[in-house]
Amino acid sequence: MRNVLVIGYGAIGKSLIAQLDQEEGGYRWAVWARGNGSPRVDAGRPVTRVTSVTEALAFETDLVVECAGHAAVAAIVPGLLAAGLPTLVCSVGVLADTTIADSLHEAAARGKTWLRLPSGAVGGLDYLRAVAHLDEVGVRYVSRKPPSAWHDELLALNIDPDTLEEEHVLFDGSADGAARRYPKNLNVAATVALNGIGMTRTQVSVVVDPAVSANTHELYIESSAGVAEFRFENNPAPDNPKTSLLTSLSVASEVRTFFQGRAS
Ligand SMILES: NC(=O)C1=CN([C@@H]2O[C@H](COP(=O)(O)OP(=O)(O)OC[C@H]3O[C@@H](n4cnc5c(N)ncnc54)[C@H](O)[C@@H]3O)[C@@H](O)[C@H]2O)C=CC1
Ligand SMILES: O=C([O-])CC(=O)C(=O)O
């Protein structure tokens, strides 16, 4: 059996379970959810509810997948890592906070396990990792989302999201600054930075663009190996328009790879 503990039963968590539950190989699922009651997978099959490290160990968890948000990573994941449970963290932007990042890495070292980041809503990271150690690498990431994705932030700037006709640059600067300014919306910026040349050297532009309907991620890389441009126009997850469907697909792929590695 493959025992997976999913923290957060929202768009990513539900989609992950729905995808893998159809496949051969026998998954058992536990969910660490907020609130009371027992979450059920869409087919109605009950899943085990876990709310402590002790219960996670009693479930004989092989792999933990966090898809609950930044606060949940800080509160829940260090204890699971320290108990030796390998963990995939979707809320990558939380690692922009060096205090939290240090606590996660220390907990993983204590538990003799690892913390891994899925590619999530973006791709091209193999290329980025390959060139990152060359001299004078330039990396620019552009997040381009429709006004509805930045509704509250635009209102706070006295900009009406419903009548915006031209693109508006919300932020231009380092990945560090972007993550500090908009921590919850920039998991991809942190993913690009951490797979590449780091939070201070990676340039980030956050653009509100009324001409796009999908969450769009653009990646521009320049080095002595050449130039590369990637553009991802992502369809939304059915349960959360702010999350790209691609994210749960990438997590499912990581989970498959983990268990294939163990079987071989
Ligand atoms: N790496 C990437 O490219 C991406 C990462 N993300 C990250 O994944 C997270 C989850 O995304 P979605 O599934 O779309 O969000 P969602 O809002 O649909 O679901 C999150 C679920 O987690 C639950 N939750 C929140 N705090 C919790 C806690 N302390 N303990 C247990 N459950 C808790 C919520 O009640 C909700 O059911 C996002 O918050 C974001 O940080 C999202 C999109 C892309
Ligand atoms: O596209 C997505 O799924 C979410 C996103 O932009 C991010 O968190 O950086």
Image (cartoon, grey):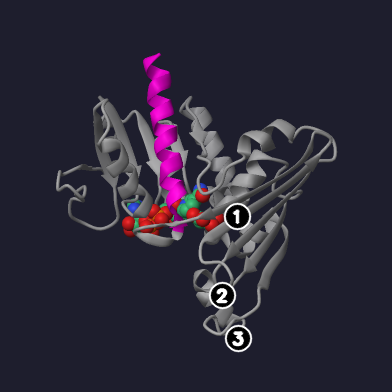
Q: CA distance from mark 2 to mark 3?
A: 9 Å
**224, 48: nearer the viewer:** 224
Q: Residue at x 27, y 25 (%)?
A: 25
Quarter of the figure that contains the C terminus: top left
Q: Amino acid at mark 3?
A: Asn
CB of mark 1 near ligand 2 (< 8 Å): yes
* Label 1 sits on residue: 217
User: For the residue labelled by badge 1, is the local secondary structure a helix, a strand or a loop?
Assistant: strand
* Label 3 sits on residue: 158
Residue 138 vertical placement versus 171 (above, below): above
Q: Residue at x 31, y 51 (%)?
A: 9
**209, 66: nearer the viewer:** 209
**The residue stretch that appears in magenta:** 243-264
Say the numbered circle drawn on residue 84. Answer: none
Residue 42 lies, in percent from the top left, at 20, 50
Residue 159 vertical placement versus 42 (above, below): below
Residue 119 lies, in percent from the top left, at 53, 41
User: For the residue labelled by badge 2, is the local secondary structure a helix, a strand or a loop?
Assistant: helix
Q: Residues within 10 Å of mark 1 (few under 14, many from 20)?
A: many
Can residue 96 be seen here? The reply is no
Q: Are marks 2 and 3 in contact (CB under 8 Å)?
A: no
* Label 2 sits on residue: 153
Mark in the foreground, 2 or 1: 1
Q: CA distance from mark 2 to mark 1?
A: 19 Å
